[in-house]
Image: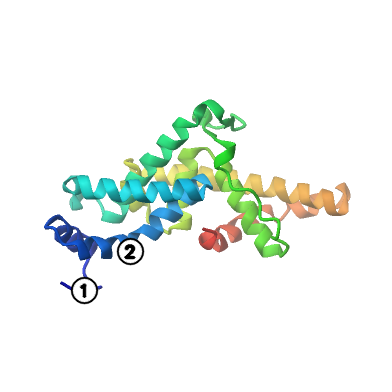
Amino acid sequence: MAVPQQQTDTELLRLMQSGDEEAFTALYRRRQGGVYRFALQMSGSETLAEDVVQETFMVLMRDAGNFDASRGSLAAYLYGIARNHVLRAFDRERALVRFDDGTEEGGDSQHENLIARPDPLGDLTRAESVEQLRQAVLALPTHYREVVVLCELHEMSYQEAADALGCVVGTVRSRLHRARAMLTEKMRGRSETRAAERVGGAEAGSASGGGGSAAGQALRTARCFA
């Protein structure tokens, strides 16, 4: 049976549960890209992102009955599953992690092998800015990183992000506010360092003045960095 493209996720899921393989294929094609980008933006690892996609849809096939449309969208449900797998991957690597600077709650950390390295061919200013932001996002503690990825990069609403993370909207809002401030500081620091390297300490101050706006502009641009 051909699966109409206009069918909703919930309708496709219902068909999938009744044994319609085409419905599952349509749902996978519709949502796997977003799940992949989420995992990649959270970890910086293409291999991990591919594994997370597989695990997420395996869970969906096995536990589709656990989805409750009254508690949020299927997309949020899938992001929630993907998030759990990403966090488990971080836990498995915890013995080898490089801890964050410790200034934020929880002292969250990130395995250095899961962080994507800068693109050596990133010569253009825009490309460099996006790469710098990508690294800055990856350096955020996990609970801040995930709200930035969901709300800024995937353009989810606070409610959708809250559904995916299993928390209240107020928590998403406060974490996102703090994450934006942290990104501004990280981008400002990178701008100062680059300015010092290029033109010396005398001009570093002027470069730092635009750090905040650069971070905001880069966030809008970086929605495509995956």
Q: Type of residue at label 1?
A: Pro
Which residue is under mark 1? 4
Given residues 2 and 178, the one toward you in this image is: 2
Which residue is more in the foreground, 181 or 90?
A: 90
Q: Residue furthest top?
A: 95
Residue found at the very far left of the displayed protein? 18
Residue 29: assigned label? 2
Please give the name of the residue rendered at 88% of the width and 50% of the height, measured from the top-left corner: 200
Residue 131: x and y, percent? 63, 55
**Res. 225 image quadrant:** bottom right
Q: Is residue 59 among the parts visible in the rendering?
A: yes
Mark 1 or mark 2, which has the lower sequence index? 1
Q: Residues within 10 Å of mark 2 (few under 14, many from 20)?
A: few
Say which amino acid is labelled 2: Arg
Q: Position of residue 10 (x, y in %)?
A: 20, 59
Quadrant where the N terminus sits is bottom left
Q: Is residue 162 visible?
A: no
Q: Is residue 195 left or right of residue 29?
A: right
Color theme of the render: rainbow
Q: Nearer the viewer, residue 77 or 54?
A: 54
- Quarter of the image for residue 168 reads top left
Residue at position x 52%, y 63% from top?
224
Left or right, 224 with reference to 4: right
Q: Position of residue 11 (x, y in %)?
A: 17, 63
